[in-house]
Amino acid sequence: MKNRRSQLPARLPLPPAPGHDPERIAETVKHSRLILEEKLRKDQERRISFKDFYIRQLRFIGLRVWFLHAGVLLMAAALIHRMPEDSSGERLQLLALLSTAAPLLVLIGIQTLSRSFASRMVELEMSTLYSLDRLFLARLSLLALIDIVGLGVLAGLFSLEWGQDLGRMLLYLFTPFTVACVGCLWLLNSPRIRDKGFGCAAYILLLLTVQVACAYRTENQTGLNALVYESSSLGIWAVVLLLSSLALIRELRKLLNTCRQIEISSPL
């Protein structure tokens, strides 16, 4: 009995195969093409230009961040005009103190980027029209562009007031800037650091402490300031700038790859 039941489906007649209807096939193809064209039209309407995309990121970053950037740069520019006229040592001390503006700018910007991790906003940002890596790269490039222009202006003011080579002033300002960026991006890439904002703030505070210590100079023209900011140390500054720039590119690639992996592995 059991064998007969198992053989029963094979004995039953199969349903007739559907006939070939060219009209129905053509109608299905036409309907599918209309659906595809409608989808493409809606996607085109939702797509915005590169300029509009960047403007939206400016608004997302917020006015408070831009005001803080402007405040740091204006304060540093005001201090440059108080530069001593005679003492080269005092000028180097002031330069060491003003170079703290670079990591401060990085700290202000990195808090905006780390907010997605601290506030668990990654899933929300992934539900937008743009890829997560594109959002991060746009915001990071905007913040970096403002910082680079601002530090370049400060270096130019310092060069005019002091009468020194512009390249030397750029070296003294952009080296702590790249070192600060590398450390913060490394912290963002580190899975063991849960509170990214706090970790970046602690790192920047450590860097600021080192810079303030480098402003120390004795009456005999000795101390960390004389050791670090004399012309004989320019080669070391250039090497640090080069190595930190290469490390910055590596950490940025890792961050963008992490964003892509999160987007691929997410069920959204």
Image (cartoon, rainbow, N blue to C red):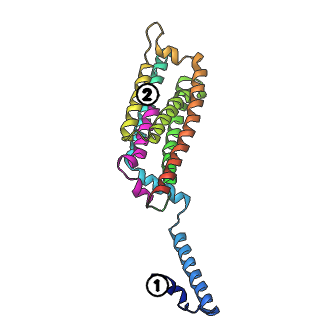
| Residue positioned 50% across, 38% down in the render | 150
Say which amino acid is labelled 2. Answer: Leu
Q: Are marks 2 and 1 in contact (CB under 8 Å)?
A: no
Mark before the other along the chain sequence, 2 or 1: 1
At mark 1, the secondary structure is helix
Crowding near the residue tagged with mark 1, few <14, some 14–19, many ≥20 C-alpha atoms within 10 Å: few
Image position, residue 130 (x, y; %): 49, 59
**Magenta: main secondary structure:** helix
Classify the position of the C terminus by image quarter. Answer: bottom left
Quadrant of the image occupied by residue 110: top left
Mark 2 and mark 1: Cα distance apart in space: 81 Å
The type of residue carrying mark 1 is Arg
Rendering coords of residue 57 (x, y %): 46, 54
- Please, is residue 35 above or below residue 208 in the view? below
Left or right of residue 51: residue 121: left
- Residue 155, given in percent of the width and then of the height, sits at 53, 31
Check the image and report above or below for 123 versus 93: below
Q: Which of 127 and 106 lies nearest the eye of the viewer?
A: 127
Numbered circle sitting on residue 5: 1
Labelled disc at residue 207? 2
Residue sitting at the far top: 220
Comparing 31 with 155, the one in front is: 31
Give percent across and percent down for residue 183.
47, 34
- Category of crowding for the residue at label 2, using alpha-carbon neighbours closer than 10 angstroms: few (below 14), some (14–19), many (at least 20): some
Magenta region: 100-126
State the residue at coordinates (41%, 22%): 212
- Residue at the location (59% across, 81% down)? 33
Q: Evaluate whether residue 35 shows in this view.
A: yes
Q: Secondary structure at mark 2?
A: helix
